[in-house]
Image (cartoon, rainbow, N blue to C red):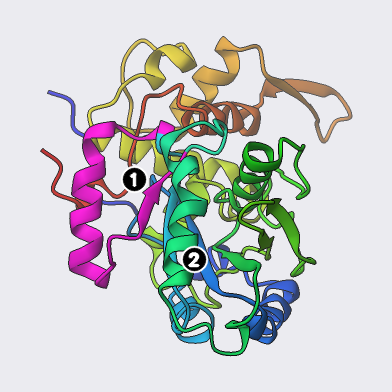
Amino acid sequence: MRRFRTCFPAVPRELLNWFPGHMGKGMKQMQQKLKQIDCVIEVHDARIPLTGRNKDFRTTVSGIKPHILVLNKQDLIERRTADAILQRLRQQDGETENIIFTNCKNQNCSGVRRVVPLAQELICGSDRYNRATEKDFCIMIIGVPNVGKSSLINALRNRHLHRKGASQVGALAGVTRSVLNRIRISQDPSVYLLDTPGILQPNIGDTETGLRLALVSCLQDHLVGEELIADYLLYLLNKQQNFRYVELLGLTEPTDSIAEALVGGAVHHGKTIRMKQLDGTVAIRPDVVAAAKLMLKAFRTGALGRIMLDEDKINVR
């Protein structure tokens, strides 16, 4: 009987804490814009619905405005988990019914269609204070890096105005670095959105949180280390009895050794690296970093199956 790790080894905290200057500046910019907005939409990754949300948003940005939580990338989790996620969020954070699952790659998905009508309903039912006489609605999009904030803006703009995106999108965390000008995404009703930089908490509370954020690209791979992130992925896959990586990496059987997995994967896919030796000769070695990147890409695109990283926090039946 195969035996796998039951816990993941400790990781140096400094590898998982990423709070560059633009994040602190972005938070101040967001606070300065509060008087100009009517609603806050917080976007988060559906694969980590309970992990990594910036708790500072509640006290500094979204506490006094109508709030919608958008759980994006729903196409990367099993549908059956949605109800369990909603129930757990309401137990843990007291979330209201204003939670929407979206897949921003598909502007016609039911979640994307619900965003503007729900925001309009919440704004009309709230005290808009200094904006009570304004006819247009202004919504701020917030969240940690690389969860799909800019993708949501572009999907809404395309859906309601039939125009191409106005906000830069990238697979690398940290693409948006400042609070931008208002972006019109709907004519009737007149709705504007403010894109904002992804902002993490200055200190990530624990190793598990940091590694899950890294696995879904909320942290930049090269800062944490592709091999370390791949090792955490291997640990989770084995824990969930998901052995699809065996075929992906050309292995003969599941393994608990990331070194074995990555060397096997590099050989299987012909990934090599030339290394100069002390005697001046050049040796060709398996490129384990390239194999780690391949493994991470397979997870992030759903090639390893629909996986929710917070499964241990949610009672999924």
Image x and y of residue 179, in percent: 74, 70
Marking on residue 309: 1
Report the span colored magenta. 75-102
Name the main secondary structure of what is drawn in magenta.
helix
Marking on residue 12: 2
Q: Is residue 21 magenta?
A: no
167 left or right of 35? right
Quarter holding the N terminus? top left
Image x and y of residue 76, in percent: 41, 33
Mark 1: secondary structure: loop
Q: Amino acid at mark 2?
A: Pro
Which residue is at 76% across, 65% downward?
A: 182
Mark 2 neighbour density, 10 Å: few (under 14) some (14–19) many (20 or more):
few
Which residue is at 46% across, 70% downward?
A: 124
Quarter holding the C terminus? top left
- Spatial CA distance of label 2 from label 1 is 21 Å
17 left or right of 86? right
Which residue is at 82% across, 36% downward?
A: 278
In this rendered view, identify the residue nearer to me: 128 or 268: 128
